[in-house]
Every structure is written in C-alpha cells, then in structure tokens.
Amino acid sequence: GAVVSQHPSWVICKSGTSVKIECRSLDFQATTMFWYRQFPKQSLMLMATSNEGSKATYEQGVEKDKFLINHASLTLSTLTVTSAHPEDSSFYICSARVGQNNQPQHFGDGTRLSIL
Amino acid sequence: DQQVKQNSPSLSVQEGRISILNCDYTNSMFDYFLWYKKYPAEGPTFLISISSIKDKNEDGRFTVFLNKSAKHLSLHIVPSQPGDSAVYFCAASPLRGNEKLTFGTGTRLTIIP
C-alpha cells in the first residue's frame, strides 16, 4: 500500500518550454501532497505543500509563478515549471502522506528535468 | 541554516556487521523523526520513524534511537546486507499541524561483501 506514482520520470526540453509533472496517490487519498527538489549530492528541499481544493503553500524563495501547483483531486497533484531555464534543471520529487499525524510521507520516484 | 545534519557523508561497513548512521538536529520543535533510503534517480523509500514520546523503535533489522536531550538520533542496521547500500536521509517534522519534513544531507552507506 501507500504507492505514489510520478510521471514523467525523465524530461529533456528546450529553454522556454513549460513542463508539467504529475504526482498520483494510487491506493489512497491524499489531501496534502508535497513537492521537493534535489540538486546533485544535496538534500531534498521542500518547495511547496499542495492542498486539495486550495492554493499551494510555497516555501520561502520559491517563485509561485514559476512553479505552478494544482491539486484538483484527492489523488492528483501537478507541478508545472513555466518557461523553464537551464537553472531549473533538477530532480523533482513529490510525496503524499497517508492519514493523520505520526504517519510517514511516501515518495514518488522523482522526475529528472533537464533544460537545454 | 541546516536544521538537520548528518555529519558523515559516507560510511563503509562489512556485510553482516552493524551499520550505525547518525543524525543531529537543532530545532527543538521537531517531534517526529524518520529515516529514508534512497537509490540514485529514485524517490526516497520510508524505512522507520519515531516520535518524541519514545526513545527507541525497532522494525526487523532496523532500529532507530532518539536522544531528545542531545537532539540526536541514530539508525542501526543489523546485520548489514549488500542491498542496504544506498543513501540514507534522516528527516524531522513538528508533530502538530505543520507536516513539513526537513531533511538531512544524507549518508552514503556502502556494504562491503
């Protein structure tokens, strides 16, 4: 149980392109999903908390107009990197939490984004 | 400001022996702690967690110890197996309300056959 699916796993695109990444909870409903970013050999950094039916909460320093988050259903959150540039190249990972407090977040397999 | 620190970037352990991974934190509001295992180009896999009301939690070969006064936790893996070779992240979160996880920088564990 507690499977989180992320798609696509790998994207290469030209600078200026917008890229959408999907995060789905396959066997549970997630009112809250999280989006992280990881640079090579660094830790996972939380970008934003995605809440079903409401606006996402962004961490300090993360541009909300650059990284659009939509959580339209209890099983799907999307992250759109708008007008992507080479500095946006990174590994993006989503997670979802099962149930209430004292429950772990379960992660998708991540999306490797490479902007040329 | 690194609130969760893993001071050992790498660790090598002989197969069959005990692996001990350490993690320190600075934020006294953290009340829930987790360990994740991560392979390259994959998302982290949850291993084990502990809340601040406990000082030990065990699940099979994995045991997490929490010392709140020292703001220190550790993950013990015994016996270590080659498949345990991966990067291990500790993470922390306040228990009530805020669910954000703050991750450490990771420790690369290599099990030597």
Image (spheres, rainbow, N blue to C red):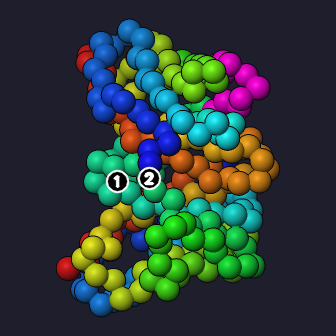
Residue labelled with disc 1: B41
- Seen in the image, is A100 located left or right of residue B15? right
Residue labelled with disc 2: A44
Q: What chain is tagged by disc 2?
A: A
Which numbered disc covers residue A92?
A: none
Taking depth in this image into account, of A75 and B27 the one nearest to the observer is B27
Query: What amino acid is found at the position of numbered circle 2 in the picture?
Result: Leu
Question: Per the image, is B9 magenta?
Answer: no
- Seen in the image, is A30 located left or right of residue A40? right
Q: What chain is tagged by disc 1?
A: B
Residue B59 is at least partly visible in this image = no
Question: Is the C-beta separation of discs 1 and 2 under 8 Å?
Answer: no
- Seen in the image, is A94 located left or right of residue B111? right
| Residue drawn 49% across the image and 86% down it | A65
- Quarter holding the C terminus of chain B? top left
Q: Which residues are magenta?
A: B49-58
Taking depth in this image into account, of B70 and A114 the one nearest to the observer is B70
Dot 1 surroundings within 10 Å: few (below 14), some, or many (20 or more)? Answer: few
Q: Is residue A101 above or below residue B72?
A: below
